[in-house]
Each structure stands twice: as structure tokens, then as C-alpha cells.
Image (cartoon, rainbow, N blue to C red):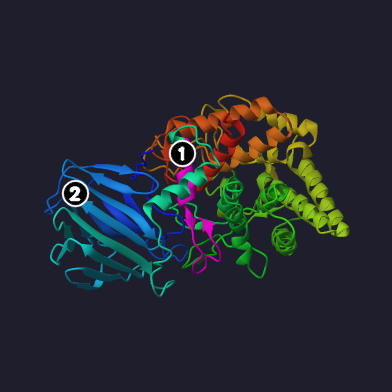
Amino acid sequence: MNINIENVPFSYPGSYIAVQKENPLFGDGIWIRSLIRPEWGTGRKKASDKLLRIIPTDARGVFIRYKTVCTADSLRFESNFGYVELFFSAYDVITVKAKDMGLVFEHSHEDAKFVNVKSTDNLFTAYVPVTYHNVEIAVSKGEMKYVPSLRRCFLTCNGDSAQCTVTVWQSMVEKTPCRTPVFTKEETKESFAAFKAHYAPSNDVHELATYILWSARMRALGNITRDVTAVSKDIMDNVWSWDNCFNSYALRKADPQLSLNNVMLFFDLQKSDGGLLDAVNPFIKVDWFTKPPVYGFFVYRLMRCGIIQGKTIEELMPKMEKLAARWERNTGNTRLFYYEDPFDSGWDNATCFDNGMPMYSPDLNAYMVWMYVCISDMAKRVGDDAKAEKYDKKAHVLLDTMVEKMFDGKQFLCLDAEEKSFETTSLIKMVPIMLGRMLPDEVFKNLAEEISREQHFLVEASLASEAVDSPYYDNRKCDAGKPNAYWRGPVWAPPVYFIHEGLFDAEYYKLATKIATRYIGLIENGKDGIYENYDAILQTGYDDSALMWTVSVYLLLKERYDKNN
């Protein structure tokens, strides 16, 4: 596996820094990046995450041609002269070793200017005020020369070798850098090998997926109350309060504690009204919106496989009840649930929201059925039969109301602000398939028939988020003046997984397998990254190229269908 650092960051589990390449520039655009962005959810202008640009040279500091070789444990720049190797030796520390080559460190990004720059022959320090980052380069072998006019540090060999460390930390959440524990390149290699063994990768993309999931761990720091998994270490470098659930389930065998942490994080931060934050990183809490209540679906499964049990159930159940109560305030005369804003759904710009807000959505009501089922099961496990019966009744009443008020005999409908029903061509109407055998047979049969129609939602790339035969279907071939396609056509991991699981539960194995294997094929057609979403027709990957729920759903489906698992 040679990781393409243009699409997938080179990072270490628990670290808040990464190395990544941009579109080629003169000398190349390889950057040491910060993964703590202070402006998320604040309305501030997007801050640059770029700290140091790195440019490989020969031993005297002259730019040369080289090739990049990246594995889980090291990033190497190799040339006819020698090599430069970077690897993580602590969470905040990258060690650089060079043999017959050198390296330029350049702080040239206009949106991340350095101040308080100090330099000696073996130490460079500076501060980035826009993101509150400290940067330190300490040379233990070789020579370093800082040229202020170029804003460059030249690391060159003394004899045939050079060595330094680059330390980066965000001073608002860390007073001093995390230099311990120290780990070797060999220990990192062993750590990744042990992790990926749980997934038994059968090809390079499968191995890449395990690397992305392994490296995406964020250690407890600031608002991050426990080790969790970032949504990405590429663009979306926060934790969002529904992406984490997919990651949790994908991690249940490889790292049970991290699996549990991913679910528990947002309950650690639960608001007084029972709601959950939209997103969080060590520095900020994003509270403009929330995210859909998918926790019932996942907590139910995590209890069945033993990740959530005993005292954890006792701790979590009242928090789940508070979350359910928060959503119960979003009900109308029909007693169905509505979204106040499209962003609360996670389907940001889906066509079903074109009629305005609030909107009573089939997916939200299906999630809430699962929420009630889950709380009922939790109550049974702690011996509270009365509460178990109460939530079991809530689940059945909501399901019956969904069928009565939202199902027209063939499909689920949405309801507008006046609770009047309307049809939608968004895949969101098919998400109730996730209820599986809980749905009446005739209802499920109609949904399965629609989802099985080729070139409707079902395409060679799996499931389109907007019916491809809809006049509202959009893709990235359109001109720049049109809206971002996003949830108006591309394939996304969450509905693929929910719909697959419901079909499998209802024993529609042939259709479930078709959807899953097409999704697996979609991911494996791309060799250099695993994307946030994919064009439903062209199968082109879009947006973040190392996104975790795409990875996690891929790994979960590979687990079910790969002969090696």
C-alpha cells in the first residue's frame, strides 16, 4: 500500500497534525497541517490549516526530482541521491531523517502568517496567531539556516545525514506539546498491523480503508472528552454527531473501547434540553444545528454485540431518554416528528426540503421508532419492565402513525409545515426500509419493489440520493452556476447502509446483496482515496477524499460479504 498523500493525509492515531500534498506547485505543495480549526461553527472566515510547506532537496539545499512513498508508519521522499523520511515519534512530534538529501521548511501561506519568529543554528520557533499554533523545528544532526526574506529554513546534511523534529501544538488547548509517549517507527508499523488484522484486507483499497480508520483517532483534548474518531483528517476534521455512530459500529471488533467512546462523546457533552451538539473539536463546539437521532439504531446493535452493557447501559439510558424527549418537542398535531432545518437531517440540500421548513420526514420518524425500541431494550436489560413497556408502546404507536399518515399505499410521503402530505423523489423517503421486519409486510414489499427498480434509485454505483429519473437529479457535470449536487444525486454511505440493513433483516437477501456489492465496487474502483460522496452515474468521488463514514460502511459491508472475513 502506497498512500496517495494528495488525497489521504499521513497522520498518526491521536495526533492533531497531518502531512498532505496539494495540487502541484513549484517545489510541490506538501504541507504539515493542523487538524484543530478554531473557526468551525463560529461564522468566522475559514482559517488556513497549513503551517509548514516542506520541499525535498539534495544534500546542499537544491530542489530535485523525487518520488513519494507513504505507508502507515512513514512518509519517504526518495531520489537518485538518497532519501528523506518523516514519521511520528509522539502525538505532536514528527521526526525527520535525511540521508544525502535535505529539506526546506517554508511558512509561505498568506492566511497563516508566522509571528515571534526566532531562529538559531539548531532551533526555529514561531507562532501562528490565526489558529493559535506553536511551531518548533529542533535539529539534532545536520545544519539549519533560516532565510527571513524567503521565509524558509534549509535543513542540509552534515556529512551524509541530517535529523530534526517538528513539533506543533495548539496553545489554546495545550500549554505544552505532547511529547510523550515516544513511539518508534517499528512500533507504529506493529500497531497498524494489529489493527488491520481485524479487517483481513483483501486488496489495496480495503487496506487503505483500515489505514484511514486507524489513523483518524483523535486523543482526548479540550472539548474532546475521550479518544474518538474524527470524521476525517482531510477537510472535515471535526467529530459530527451522527458520523461517529457508523465509525463506532465499524470499530466494535478492532477497538471496543474506541467504539464505545465514539457513541459516548456527544452524551458527555449533552445539552440541558437533551439535544446533542452538531459537531465538536478540541477548541470549539458547533451548536448551530443538531444531527438526526440515529443513536437508537446503533446503540441497539452495540448492546447486542456486547460493546454497551452493564453499568454503561444504566449511565446511557437516561441520556437517551433526554434525547428522545428533545425530539418529542418537534412533533405536530399528527404526533409525527419534523426537522426544523435541513442541516438537522444531515441531508443538507435534498430536494425534499425545497417545499420549506419545518418538514415531517420519513427518515426522522424511522430513526425515532428505533430510538424507542432501543430504550425499551435498555430498560429490559436493567430490569425496568414498566419503562420497557412504555417505550415499546411508543415505538408501536409511532410506527402505526407513520403508516397511517405518511404511507399512501405505495410509498412514504413527506408532510409540509401545515402537515399536508407531498411526494418526494429524494432517497430519504426510502430510509424507513431500515425498520426491516417491524414494517407491515405489504408496506415493506412496496418499498422493496421501488428500491429494486434499475435506473431509479438503484444504479451501478448502488443508491443515488435523488432518483436519477427525476427532473431534479443533479450532478457535477453541470455548469458552475447550478447548486452543489451534494444530496441531490450523489451516492452517500448512510442511506446505503440503513437500507441494506433493513433489507437484510427482512430477508430480502438478493436485493441487499446487490446494493452492498455495488457499493463495495464503487469504493474499490477508486484507488487513491475514499470520498465523502460519489457521482451516481460517473462514479467520480467528490469532496473530502478520506471521509470516515464512507470508510466505515465500506468496511462493514466487506465484513459481511468478503470471503476473507
Q: Which of the 4 image quadrants contains residue 552?
A: top right
Q: Which of the 4 image quadrants contains residue 463?
A: top right
Residue depicted at 30% across the width and 42% down the height: 69
Observer-side mark, 2 or 1, equals 1
Dot 1 amino acid type: Glu
Q: Which of the 4 image quadrants contains residue 350?
A: top right
Residue 226, compared with residue 363, is above or below; it is below
Q: Is residue 527 left or right of residue 119?
A: right
Dot 2 amino acid type: Gly
C-beta proximity under 8 Å, tags 2 and 1: no
Residue depicted at 75% across the width and 62% down the height: 314
Q: In this view, does 543 lie to the left or right of 30?
A: right
- The spot of residue 168 in percent (x, y) is 34, 65
Q: What element carries label 2?
A: loop
- The spot of residue 453 in percent (x, y) is 62, 25
Q: What element carries label 1?
A: helix
Which span is picked out in magenta? 206-229
The residue under label 1 is 207
> Whole-Å distance between the Cαs marked 2 and 1?
30 Å
Q: How crowded is mark 1: few (under 14 residues within 10 Å), some or many (20 or more)?
A: some
Residue depicted at 42% across the width and 51% down the height: 188
151 or 125: which is nearer to us? Answer: 125
The residue under label 2 is 27
- Quarter of the picture containing the C terminus is top right
Residue 342 appears in the picture as rendered: no
Residue depicted at 14% across the width and 62% down the height: 150
Residue 134, compared with residue 555, is above or below; it is below
- Quarter of the picture containing the N terminus is top left
Residue 252, compared with residue 148, is above or below; it is above
| In magenta stretch: residue 307 | no
- The spot of residue 142 in percent (x, y) is 17, 60
